[in-house]
Image (tube, rainbow, N blue to C red):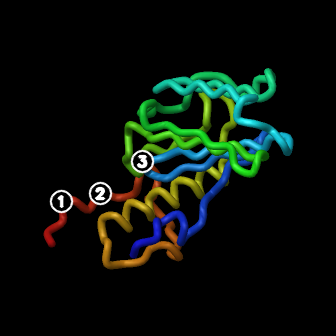
Amino acid sequence: MSVHFEERSGVIPCKTAWGSWYQTMEEVYIEVNVPPGTSAKEIKCNIGSKQIELRVKDQQIFKGKLFGSTVCDEATWTLEDKKLIRIVLMKTNREAGNCWQSLLEGEFMADPWVQDQMQRKLTLERFQRENPGFDFSGAEISGNFHGGGPDFSSLQK
């Protein structure tokens, strides 16, 4: 299975006024719609391990403390087709139970349904990693999936 789990199963985006954000166990993706024709020189993106700021054409898009900590040396941003900024943040805590509830503390929160779907997706991603011979990309999950789901590590194989 050479294709990443999220590519096979889709993503659960949290929509915002400027675009959307979504997450996997390892990363947080931010997609920002900008006016067509925007150049990279017009973008100022400052990413730290616990904070982020994005400005486009001297207008602040967002600024604040991230919901969780990230590895700032591994963060990237790209401008695609001069109309979409894609930011990728690497989480420091890459457990299925580390489901961000919002992009920034107190801002851009996922509504309860989206949060529930995000946690389900991270739990299935965890199951996929623990059982590489199976395909969980189309699976549904119910029951105890919050906090990354049940811990099967103590069961005998």
Looking at the rendered structure, the kind of residue marked 2 is: Asp
Which of the labelled discs sits on residue 97, or is there none? 3
Residue occupying image coordinates x 80% and y 38%: 38
Residue indicated by mark 2: 151
Task: Assess whether mark 1 and mark 2 are in contact (beta carbons under 8 angstroms).
Answer: yes
Q: Are marks 1 and 3 in contact (CB under 8 Å)?
A: no
Q: Where 56 sits versus 144, above or below?
A: above
Q: Residue most toward the left?
A: 156
Residue 54 position by quadrant: top right
Residue 148: x %, y % from top left: 41, 53
Identity of the amino acid at label 3? Answer: Gly
- Secondary structure under the numbered disc 2 in the rendered image: loop
Q: Residue at x 45, y 30 (%)?
A: 72
Which of the two discs, 3 and 2, labels the residue nearer the N terminus? 3
Given residues 20 and 35, the one toward you in this image is 35
Marks 1 and 3, how far apart at CA? 18 Å
Q: Nearer the viewer, residue 43 or 52?
A: 43
Callout 2 environment at 10 Å: few (<14), some (14 to 19), or many (20+)?
few
The foreground one among 60 and 156 is 60
